[in-house]
Image (cartoon, rainbow, N blue to C red):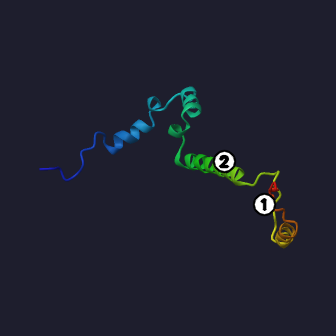
């Protein structure tokens, strides 16, 4: 028959005593090294969320830069559109040049 309460390895009081023990803390040098090499395991939730948010912003700006138009190509604005269409139709070059037939 399963126990009604879960079997804990440590009691609550034992865990609270372990928290205050100097042996339960990593030395500062080790903590700093871990923070540099693997930041996600040493940071708290708030710091992790901030890192993810800033990483997302950097990714989005890089994506936006790729989506932008090339600077060499001018942007055709709506007010220019009728002028551009008119210029194309009035000064249209023939697509196929006629071939002179030898008689």
Q: Residue 41: horizontal and vertical position, in percent?
A: 50, 38
| Residue at the disc numbered 1 | 95
Dot 2: what SS? Answer: helix
Where, by quadrant of the figure, is residue 84 drawn? bottom right
Q: Residue 94: horizontal and vertical position, in percent?
A: 81, 62
**Which one is earlier in the sequence, the residue at label 1 or at label 2?**
2
Count of labels in the image = 2
Of 4 and 66, the residue lying toward us = 66
Of 64 and 103, the residue lying toward us = 103
Asked whether disc 1 touches disc 2, contact meaning CB atoms under 8 Å apart, the reply is no
Of 101 and 84, the residue lying toward us = 101
- With respect to residue 42, does 71 lie above or below? below
| Residue at the disc numbered 2 | 58
Left or right: 15, with 62 as reference point: left
Q: Residue 35: horizontal and vertical position, in percent?
A: 57, 34
Dot 1: what SS? Answer: loop
- With respect to residue 74, does 14 lie above or below? above
Residue that appears at 19% across and 53% down: 4
Q: How many residues crowd mark 2 within 10 Å: few (<14), some (14–19), many (20+)?
A: few
Residue that appears at 40% across and 38% down: 17
Q: Give me the C-alpha separation between circle 1 and circle 2.
A: 47 Å
Q: Residue 16: horizontal and vertical position, in percent?
A: 40, 42
Of circles 1 and 2, the one toward us is 1
Residue that appears at 60% across and 49% down: 50
Residue that appears at 15% across and 50% down: 2
Quadrant (top left, top right, bottom left, bottom right) of the C terminus: bottom right
Left or right: 93, with 57 as reference point: right
Where, by quadrant of the figure, is residue 67 drawn? bottom right
């Amino acid at each position: 028959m399963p126990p009604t309460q879960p079997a804990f390895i440590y009691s609550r009081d034992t865990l609270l005593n372990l928290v205050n023990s100097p042996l339960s803390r990593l030395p500062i040098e080790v903590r700093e090294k871990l923070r540099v090499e693997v930041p996600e395991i040493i940071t708290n939730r708030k710091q992790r969320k901030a890192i993810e948010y800033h990483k997302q912003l950097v990714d989005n700006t890089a994506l936006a830069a790729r989506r932008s138009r090339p600077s060499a190509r001018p942007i055709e604005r709506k007010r220019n559109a009728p002028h551009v269409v008119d210029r194309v139709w009035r000064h249209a070059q023939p697509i196929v040049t006629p071939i002179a037939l030898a008689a």
